[in-house]
Amino acid sequence: MKHSFITTKTDSHFPIQNLPYGIFQIKGQSPRVGTAIGDYVLDLSVIDKAGLLDGTGAEAKNIFSATSLNRFMALRRPVWSAVRSKLQYLLDADTPDIRDNSALRSKGFHLMEDVEMLLPAEIGDYTDFYASKEHATNVGIMFRGKENALMPNWTHLPVGYHGRASSVVISGTDIHRPQGQMKPVDVSLPVFGPCLQLDFELEMGWFIGPGNEMGQPVSIKNAEDQIFGLVLVNDWSARDIQAWEYQPLGPFLAKNFATSISPWVVPLDALEPFRTAGPKQDPAPLPYLQTTKASAFDINLEVSLQGEGMAVPHRITISNFRYLYWSMAQQIAHHTVGGCNLRPGDLLASGTISGPEKESRGSLLELTWRGTEPIHMENEEKRVWLEDGDQLTITGWCQGEGYRVGFGEVTSRVLPVEHHHQTKQLIHPYIKK
């Protein structure tokens, strides 16, 4: 088992076995690329300028002085692996290059609490899938009944939609309650006002590396070579707005107001020890989606909620990434089979990740069964939907022997709706209640 000269606790998300990438900023300085090790951020631009990344294929290209990871993502998996291997060597307890160079250590390492984390990439496009069978089944039962829970195409292809890249935000960004049109069941016409059924969605996302040329699909066997790394995702959802607007074309205003992601991008190589088989797929997918490779990963996921009147967060969900019916590779192969071109920095997300048990459901829609089964928390508080002032936190990690490969967390607080002068008068009396 590898150990670094930077001390890390056994429950740290960022031991030497991980080494995720992110964009950090020190006040008054330009953003640049770092990796997380224990409680520190290592400035990779300093290491690169010192010549310690020579021979990796990423050296001397100002890749690590950039304000996003896009150029690094474009360099392909052999380069990513070479950089990761070199960093593991340099941070090893037995390697003196950085360990014994006090000037380099002083310049290169920064405490996480002293830096600001920014979006890791310039996200050109964002695609959200619907890849959890348990989630799709639960939602289908609620809206269509048990006999029609899954749409006829669901077990044949990874369902997805194109989301809004401009509203993808970093962990710690507060989210204003959205407003829009809704049609309550007891009125005949739609009304306008703040969303009353604000929800979270427990998801994971992955950033695309080199991408593909338009008209040239990515084969299932090569799909994982497109995955630069993974992040945690909270794809916020306005359920009452969505229920009115989604037919016939699907999510729009109910989903485009915010998607929150964690700042550290965990390389696929760091997840290899936790590769596992996903759920059995029946019927067998069409040939372009077929693979014999284990394509799921054992990533523990938790969600906690803390209201303004609560002293500590209350855990409301325990789930796992391995529950996904459709794998990342299958989602990429399907996304590109029609000729769509993916580009470095594109973000794909899994859709809500739910497991077989009630406590493993990945949204309030499911946890409260569309509002009929409130969640009871401390101080006699309960929730059906998110309230103003609530802080929602998602965390995730893989558990190794004596170490964790973690993702940190994605956390955000719900703020009241931002009313504008001209819209205040449009709010229907029903909503004011």
Image (tube, rainbow, N blue to C red):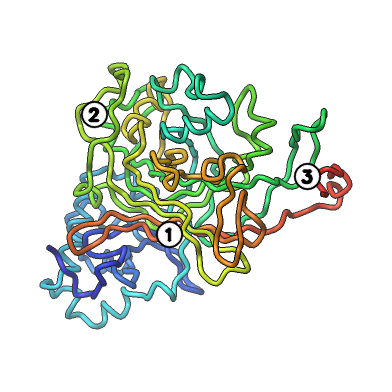
Residue assigned mark 3: 193
SS for dot 3? strand
SS for dot 2? helix
Q: Is residue 185 left or right of residue 48?
A: right
Q: Nearer the viewer, residue 152 or 361?
A: 361
Q: Is residue 383 left or right of residue 337?
A: right
Q: Quadrant of the image for the N terminus? A: bottom left
**Rendered image: mark on residue 221:** 2
Q: Is residue 190 left or right of residue 73?
A: right
Q: Earlier along the polypeptide chain: callout 2 or callout 1?
A: 2
**Rendered image: mark on residue 409:** 1
Crowd around label 2: few <14 · some 14–19 · many ≥20 (10 Å): some
Crowd around label 3: few <14 · some 14–19 · many ≥20 (10 Å): many
Q: Position of residue 93 (x, y in %)?
A: 14, 72
SS for dot 1? strand
Mark 2 and mark 1: Cα distance apart in space: 31 Å
Q: Position of residue 127 (x, y in %)?
A: 48, 36
Q: Amino acid at mark 2?
A: Lys
**Image label count:** 3
Q: Amino acid at mark 3?
A: Gly
Contact, mark 1 vs mark 3 (Cβ under 8 Å) = no
Residue 377 falls in which quadrant of the image?
Answer: bottom right
- Depth-wise, is mark 3 or mark 2 nearer the camera? 3
Q: Residue furthest right?
A: 425
Q: Is residue 44 visible?
A: no
